[in-house]
Image (spheres, helix red, strand yellow):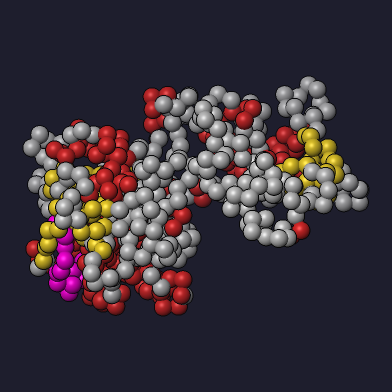
Amino acid sequence: MSFQQQQDTYEAQYCFQSLKITRDTWFDNQFYTSFFMWDSFTSGVAVSIMRNADKYNGVNEFAEMEYLNVTVVTSNKPYCINDGSNPFFDGRAIPKFNLQRDGVHSGHVQTGLQDSFCLVPGNNKGICEDGYTKEVTGSEGVRVLVAKKAKPNQDVHSPLDREFFISFLDVLNLPQHTGRFNFATQFPYYSETLYKPDFTNRSLGKPVVFDMDMSAGDFLTLLYLLKVPVETINLKGILVSGNGWANAATIDVIYDVLHMMGRDDIPVGLGNVTALGTPSLGCKYVKAIPHGSGGFLDSDTVYGLARTLPRSPRRYTAENSVKFGAPRNTDHPELRQPLAMEVWQSITRELNPSDKITLLTNGPLTNLANIVLSDENASSIIQNVYIVGGHIVDEHGEKGNVFTVPSNEYAEFNMFLDPLAAKKVIESDLQIILIPLSAQRKVVSFKSILKSLKLADKTPEALFAYRLLSLMQKLRRQHQTYHHMDIFLGEMLGAVFLADGPNLYPTMQIKPVSVLAGNIGKDGQIVINGKNGKLVSILSNFNSEAYYSQFANFFGDRRQSAVVASFDEQEKKWSMPPNQTEGV
């Protein structure tokens, strides 16, 4: 209540809203006893100690301090056991770092979230203490000045019970050094406009749902699908894999691309952030995605180019409501980010009885596997599934592309990121058209695709694609850690083949295949299985020159082009009165 009444600066408003949405979406009703502002409190204590540098023993305004002998626990009771988990002791005549054989570092080291040693049957809380800070005696501890207790508020009439809370609110509301702008004051004529096309007099084409994981190739694929005439492809919705090449919040960039292209009508659903059958707090597969090198950070920002896109009014948000299982309603539950399954159900409800959906998947098959598992009508509603991914292990010995897991030589990334989902989908009753790694590798020439785009008309989307691909090519040339950047070029092949396959003069093969799962060294590999394999249609060859030409031609087509070209264009519109922005 005190914070709500004291929001005189943009910083205070931001912090209040952040804390409020955290409280409103907390998983239970114990927010005030289970959420703590540790980082803010630590900053306050540190600043106060620095202000009192002339005094001893860390004297400060907010915490009672005491010297303690502490260590960070790296193992668990019973101590002094040798089970192969502890590299400090196991197999060593002398413990590493001269640690004590019966000390807090000499026991079992937790090997993962599902380590059976740490789990207690019937109890959600394990017994392992790896990472805990513990007070100890002897040489294994270090003498550290510790904040033992927050000082109470000296004003007994104040609703705030800690001295730090008073300072926190006072400092946030200081007029000195406050922010000059928020979004609305920076752009005085800002307006939230949604662009939705009118297809009343147009014959809509094949209903398509695009399942993507937000890699660079996927964003180019999305732009391509939006450029294909709606008489050919009617993009009904987008499902997003949260366990692929980008953070789940990168869904904002999808909204921006749709806004740019005038397609704010297309629903976007967020899927799981972990693979099928893995714990919600961790996933061994997504750890294979690098930070940088085309993975997290790079994909999250589309290599820094996301800031150039126009800003959509639609954003990722944690706003929630009781209707969808939250413990309470937030201020704006209608803004809640839809889930992948909800978008799928919405699309299928609106289908005409004779319509069937074509799915194009460019990421791990988590979303589609969940659909197959939960929607018993899925196989009757889905006409075809075009899967961009997979690598057929054959006698030629061509390797896969999971370059961050050397032990797995023959898997393709999309299948590796969720092998159980891949197995469920590919071996299901669905009609599968596979665009494997061997086909994708036929169109991984930066030179060819950039040459084709350079000859195309300079639409906003063509210029964006050219800038992105040029940047990726430059990174590949100049930095060894980006040597694999061409793997993203093949991701557009599925969309081009779906839109106009015959003009690529394709060669298809039907083979019985199975997906391997359960062994990190083979997870996601696809093998020929003549006895029990599922028959799938596999793209084996096509005209690559036709592919490059078709890709560039659609990007350069003035039809279905960008409604708003960039954030710069928006900035000009929002900075001047509407009657002065004509022609901007």
Residue 62 left/right relative to 334 = right
Asked if 287 appears above or below 508 in the picture, the reply is above
Point out residue 442 in the picture as x, y percentages from the top left corner. Answer: 23, 72
- Front residue of this view, candidates 278 and 582: 278
- Front residue of this view, candidates 221 and 488: 488
Point out residue 470 in the picture as x, y percentages from the top left corner. Answer: 36, 72
Residue 536 left/right relative to 318 = left
At 16% from the left edge and 62% from the top edge, which residue is drawn? 539
- Front residue of this view, candidates 443 and 513: 513
Query: What residue occupies the far top of the structure in this picture?
Result: 157
Asked if 179 appears above or below 457 in the picture, the reply is above
At 30% from the left edge and 37% from the top edge, which residue is drawn? 341
Residue 496 left/right relative to 368 = left
- Front residue of this view, candidates 500 and 405: 405
Point out residue 24 in the picture as x, y percentages from the top left corner. Answer: 52, 29
Asked if 106 appears above or below 443 in the picture, the reply is above
Q: Is residue 153 magenta?
A: no
Residue 199 shows up from this direction? no
Residue 404 left/right relative to 412 = right
Range drawn in magenta: 537-553
